[in-house]
Amino acid sequence: MAVVQTNDGMQIAPENAARYDGVVGFVTAIDPAKAASVYKHVYPVLQHSYEELGYPGKQFNNRLVAVIDHLLTTPEPQGPLAIKLVQVQGEVPSQQPWLRYEFADPRLQSLSSGQKILLRMGPQNTQRIKSALRALRAQIASRS
């Protein structure tokens, strides 16, 4: 993760968003109607697997729509995101300190993993992913 040290502390660097461009481009290039068609085709397998995972009588589609709705509620902060490096005590030094970054704002740090990934993508990529999620949701939300 690209970070920058400022007078206000450590922040996610604006150029960090570029590392997500390929994935965001891939996701946003998917036609929502075609994705929904594939989803409808494989839905029986998804539903069966969902029930086998311990959700008998529950609908996988309802859970998928709920997760999309959850991701769509990801806040869109204005300005750079302050982060902090979590200190790890021990004799073995961390070989990957970038795995220890947390949001300095406890409200942002308490978000789900999916929401935090959206935040790390940068505002433009987050908006593009949210748009793709809304389009997919529109295609699958009416499915029971």
Image (cartoon, grey):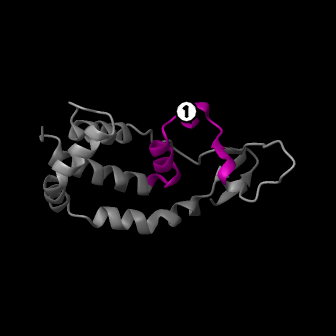
Residue shown at 27%/45% (left/top)? 49
- Residue 31, above or below 87: below
Please state, as top left, top right, bottom left or bottom right, where the N terminus lies in the image: bottom right
Q: Is residue 60 above or below residue 34?
A: above
Highlighted range, magenta: 99-123
Q: Residue at x 82, y 54 (%)?
A: 93
> Quadrant location of the C terminus?
top left
- Along the line of sight, the residue nearer the viewer: 120 or 95: 95
> Which residue lies at the image location 71% right of the left edge and 58% below the top edge?
96
In the depicted structure, whether residue 37 falls above or below residue 48 = below
- Find disc 1 in the rendering and name its residue: 110
Is 122 within the magenta?
Answer: yes
| Residue found 68% across the figure and 55% down from its top | 98
Q: Main secondary structure of the magenta part?
A: helix
Residue 119 falls left or right of residue 47: right
Inspect the magenta stretch and tell me whether residue 111 lies in it.
Answer: yes
Q: Which residue, as the protein is rendered here, is positioned at the far front?
A: 52
